[in-house]
Amino acid sequence: MCRGNRSQQPVISEENIKEKEESVLSNQSSEVSQARMEATYNSANGRGNKNVVKYNRWGYFFLIPFIVVYIIFQLIPLVSTVYNSFYENYMSGLKQIGPNFVGIENYKQLFVSGDIWIYFKNTMIMWILGFLPQIFFSLLLGSWFSDNRLKLRAAGFFKTVIYLPNLIMASAFSMLFFTLFADSGPVNSILMQMGILSEPFSFMSNATSVRSLVGFMNFIMWFGNTTILLMAGMLGIDPGLFEAAEIDGCTSTQKFFLITLPILKPILLFVLVTSLIGGLQMFDVPQILTNGTGDPMRSSMTLIMYLNKHLFSKNYGMAGALSVLLFIITGILSLIIFNFSGNKEAINRKAR
Amino acid sequence: MGNSKNQQLDEGMSLGARRVLANVVLIILSFLCLCWFYVLFVNATRSNGELTAGFSPIPSTHLFENWNNLIHGTQPVLFGMLNSIIVAGLSAFLCTYFSTMTAYAIHAYDFKLKKPMFTFILMVMMIPTQVTALGFVQLINKMKIDDTFIPLIVPSIAAPVTFFYMKQYMDSTLSLSLIEAARIDGAGEFRIFNTIAFPLMKPAIAVQAIFTFVASWNNYFVPALVLHSDKKKTLPILIAQLRSADFLKFDMGQVYCMIAFSILPVIVVYLILSKYIVGGVSLGGVKE
C-alpha cells in the first residue's frame, strides 16, 4: 500500500507522509474502510481491471475546459506577443507601418532609447518605498498576533481592519488619494487650518511626494495581507522552541531574531519574490494618480504604464519587446519560488 | 535566586509595556487604514460649496442630492455598476466551478499526464496577465469579440492560483474512498463530481468566489483595453475617465459619491464575511 502511495503522489514528498499517516489511521479504524482504501489505491494506480483504466480517462475529460481556455486566452496570446516583438508594426499618423520582420531591432531600440531604465528605476523606487514599511510592520504585527503571552484584545478586529484596504479597488483608492491630496483638497485644507502650511502644497507636481504617495498606498493596501501570511508561518513554529529559549533566559527580542526570523526565512523569501513580481506589475495606482502621464517629468511612470502607452498607440513591436522582457524577468523570479515550493507546501500545511 | 526573581519582574513589566506598545501601533495603523474611507464617506454627503470651503469631519445632508446629480450626470454610472456585477459575478462562478473541476481531475484520477500537468500549472501560476495583453488584444480583435464581456469572463476558467488553492483544500478534505463508494453505488463520474465533490468543497469555493469577484470587480488594465462603448464600461474605467476629464469642471460632491459608490459593495461584503476571508488568505498562501 505504501508503494502504491508513492507512485500515486510523486509530486510532493510531504504529501506522501501525510497520506501514509492517513492510511495508517484508517487501517486501525475498520476493516470496511480498509477494503475501500485498497480498492481506491488499486484503482488510483491504474493497475486494476479495465473499468479502472476506463474511469481514469475522466481525468483528461475534466481537464479539457482548463486546457482549452488556457491555450486560447493565455498561450496563443503569449506566442503572438513574442512573435510581434520581432516585427516592426506601428501607426505613423493614420498610416500603418509594417508588420515587417526586423529581428531584434525592437529590443535594441528599447535599451538604446534609455527610457526603459528610467521606468524600471521608477518602478523599483516606488516598490521599495512600499515594501520596506510593509515587511517591517508585517513582521512586527505578525509576531504580536502570534504571541500567546501577549494576549492582545480585539486582535480579530485589527486583522479585519488591516486587511480591508487590500480588497479596495486600486483605481478608486488612487482617485480618492488624488482628490484628497489635490491643491484644494482636504489634506491641504487641514494642514492650513492647523497652521502647518501657509499656502497649499502641490503634492502632484513634486516627484518625491508622488512617489511617496504611490509607495504609501501600496504599503496600506498590502501590509495586511503580508501580516496574515507571516502570522500563519509564525503560528506553525514549534512552541517548545520558545519555551526552551525562555528557560535559557531569552528576551522576546532575542527570541524574535534568533528563532522566529531564521525559521521564517523561506516564507520571507516567498513574500519578497511575490511582492517583487507584484511590484513589477504596478499599474493602477500610478496610472490613475497621474492620469497615465507619470508626471512630474515621468518620475512615476512604471514599466506597465509604458506598456499600456504602447498598446494604446498601437506600437505593437515595442509593446511586444517590452512584454517579452517582463515575461523573462517574472519567469526568473517565479523559478526562485518554484525551487522553494517544497517549503511553500510546508507553509501552507502549517497554515491550516 | 534574587537574580531570577528580578528577571521575572523585568519580563513581567516588559510584557505590559509591550502590550501597550502593540495596541498603540495597531490603533495608529488602523487609523491609517480607515481614515481615508471616513473622509470619503463624509465628503460624499457634502455639497460642492461646502467642500471647497474647507474640510470638516462632520457629515452633511447632501448625500441624496449628490447621488441624484451623479446618476443623471454624463457618466453612465448605473450601467457601470450593472456591468461590473455581471462580469465579476460570472467570472467568480466560472472560475470556481472549473478550477474545482481541474483540481478534481488532478486529485481523483491517475493518468499519464497527471504529473506534467500539475507541474505545468504550478509553473504558469506567476505569469502576469499584462505580459500577454498584446497578444490577447490582437486575438480578441481577430475573433471579433472586442467590446464584449466574453474576453473578461471566459478566461477566468483557467485560473492557476484558484486551482492551486482548490487542490490544497482537496488534499486535506476530499477522501478518495468517498468517491470510490459513490462509484460502487453506480454513480457516473460527472455526477460524482457535481453532487459529491463540488458540494464538499463549499468552504473553499466561498472564499475563492469572493476573491475572484473582488479581483474582477477591481480589474482595470484588461477591461480598459477591451471595452470601448460607454454603456459597456465597468466601474474602474469610469473612475479613470473621471480622472482624465477636466477636474475643475466637476462637482466634487459627485466625485466623492462616485468613488464611495464603487467601493461600498466590496466593503459591505467584506464586513459580513471578513472572518472567512482573513482565514482564507493564510490557507491559500499565494494571493499576490
Image (cartoon, coloured by chain):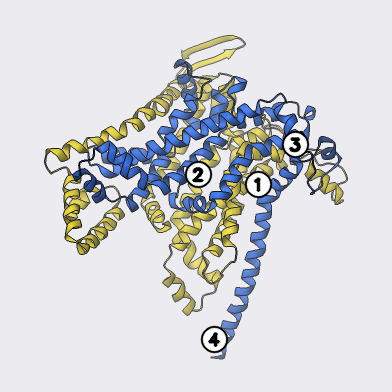
Chain colours: A yellow, B blue
At a point 65% along the width and 46% down the height, the residue shown is: A216
Q: Residues within 10 Å of mark 2 (few under 14, many from 20)?
A: some
**x, y (%) of residue B147?**
53, 20
Which of B143 and B91 lies nearest the eye of the viewer?
B91
What element does badge 4 sit on?
A: helix
Mark 4, mark 2: which one is toward the viewer? Answer: 2
**Which residue is most to the top?**
A95
What's the amino acid at mark 3?
A: Phe
Residue A216: give its label: 1
Tag 3 residue: B64
Q: Are marks 3 and 2 in contact (CB under 8 Å)?
A: no
Q: Which residue is mark 2?
A: B288
Question: Could you tell me how far apart the alpha carbons at marks 4 and 3 are, in whole angstroms?
Answer: 66 Å
Name the disc covering residue B11, or none. none
Can residue B287 be seen here? The reply is: yes
- Count of numbered circles on the image: 4
Q: Pointer 4 and pointer 1: residues touching (CB < 8 Å)?
A: no
Q: Chain of mark 1?
A: A
Write down the chain letter for disc 2: B
